[in-house]
Amino acid sequence: MDKVCIKRGVISLLLVLGLSCSYFVTAKAESTLDIVEYKQISTLNDVSVKKEFTLTFDEKIDEKVLENRYIELIETSSGKKVSLSFEALDDKNVKVIPKKLNKDKTYYLIVNKPVQTEDKKLYKKGVLIVVNMESEKKLQHDFQVDLDGDLKISDKSKKKIDKKTVDNKKDSTEKKTTENKKQPNKNDKLSEKISILSKSSRFQDKFIGKVLKGASENYEKHKILPSVTIAQAIWESGWGRSEKATKYNNLFGIKAGKTWTGKSVKIKSSKWRVYSSWKQSINDHATVLLKDRYVNAGVFKASNYVQQIKAIQKGGYCSGSSYVGDICKIINKYNLWQYDVNGKELSY
């Protein structure tokens, strides 16, 4: 069972603003979810369909908060809310019980707070946790969350596994066998993420799903972060909808220079590279970044996406003054950092 701890001030904020209790029921935002209004703070994977959540507030809970769905669970592809029931464990702890969760779906567990705009309109804004329904395996996490997006995670189940591994050391042969068994799981998780994205009704998710595998493979081979590859593809191709992307599989707008020996096409006054697939385009993007000017600019010394995209621009990829900000904005808006190893959202 997941525990979400809400820091002091959340409940008082709701009451101080004097919101109508019907707001959370009648607001138009209830029928669809605009992700821009919420800040993602974590992702849960391999969540059981029997999952229940415990929310812990450090102030006494007003019963009206629960009655009016201050907490929501929304299925991402349809935008439909999951019916929830609440069980008060005491005056600060509440169990949230979903009526039904389905495998191979992704949900948003949302803790809302109201915001009043200058024109005195109210809309919901808060934090969300991505819940991926991937298997029956149960994970236990402790969450401490505030509505500004701070998060501390302590994975109890992982600690128990690590302790058991230490207490029951195996010989080197058994360890190698365990490592070999873990490798397919990594690929399986990537395939499951791609499957979830491909089933989404959002064209942005579908595009990310189509390029995620190639971007991840490029990271394994060349250490170009998946978030950077995907964001550049989005920026250069308009989510794969540009003429060069749809007709010639050129996702990154790479020109056919004198050293290019492959197929090319002339559009207006310039020649552009032609690829047989988007995967080939992604692979060639990595080849371009392996040139000395990018290596010398520090592209492969970067430890996060902000550093890497700055180094790519320094190497001469794009001279536009807003390029770094434009790419980083895409990464943050669509949470592409989650596909990087140890990725997290950064300011730029």
Image (cartoon, grey):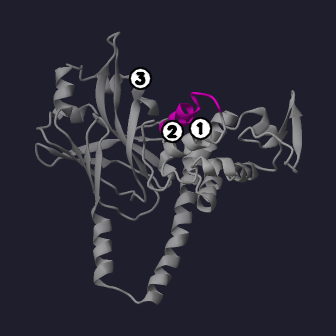
Closer to the eye: label 3 or 2: 2
Upstream in sequence: badge 1 or badge 3: 3
Upstream in sequence: badge 3 or badge 2: 3
Q: Determine whether label 3 and label 2 are within 8 Å by CB.
A: no
Q: Alpha carbon of mark 1 to alpha carbon of mark 2: how far?
A: 9 Å
Residue drawn at 63 percent across, 62 percent down: 221
Q: Nearer the viewer, residue 211 or 45?
A: 211
Q: Position of residue 46 (x, y in %)?
A: 43, 60
User: Disc number at residue 334?
Assistant: 2
Q: Position of residue 274 (x, y in %)?
A: 83, 44
Magenta residues, start to end: 319-332
Closer to the eye: label 1 or 3: 1
Mark 2, residues whose alpha carbon is within 10 Å: few (<14), some, or many (≥20)?
some
Q: Alpha carbon of mark 3 to alpha carbon of mark 2: how far?
A: 23 Å
Query: Magenta region, mostly helix, strand or loop?
Result: helix
Residue drawn at 65 percent across, 54 percent down: 214
Mark 3, residues whose alpha carbon is within 10 Å: few (<14), some, or many (≥20)?
few
Give, as a three-letter code, the residue at label 1.
Gln
- 326 in the magenta segment: yes
Residue 291 horizontal side relative to residue 308, left or right: right
Q: Determine whether label 1 and label 3 are within 8 Å by CB.
A: no
- 176 in the magenta segment: no
Mark 1, residues whose alpha carbon is within 10 Å: few (<14), some, or many (≥20)?
some
Residue 7 can be seen, yes or no: yes
Upstream in sequence: badge 1 or badge 2: 1
Q: Alpha carbon of mark 1 to alpha carbon of mark 3: how far?
A: 23 Å
Residue at mark 1: 204
Q: Secondary structure at mark 2?
A: loop
Give, as a three-letter code, the residue at label 2.
Tyr
Residue at mark 3: 28
Q: Determine whether label 1 and label 2 are within 8 Å by CB.
A: yes
**Quadrant holding the C terminus:** top left
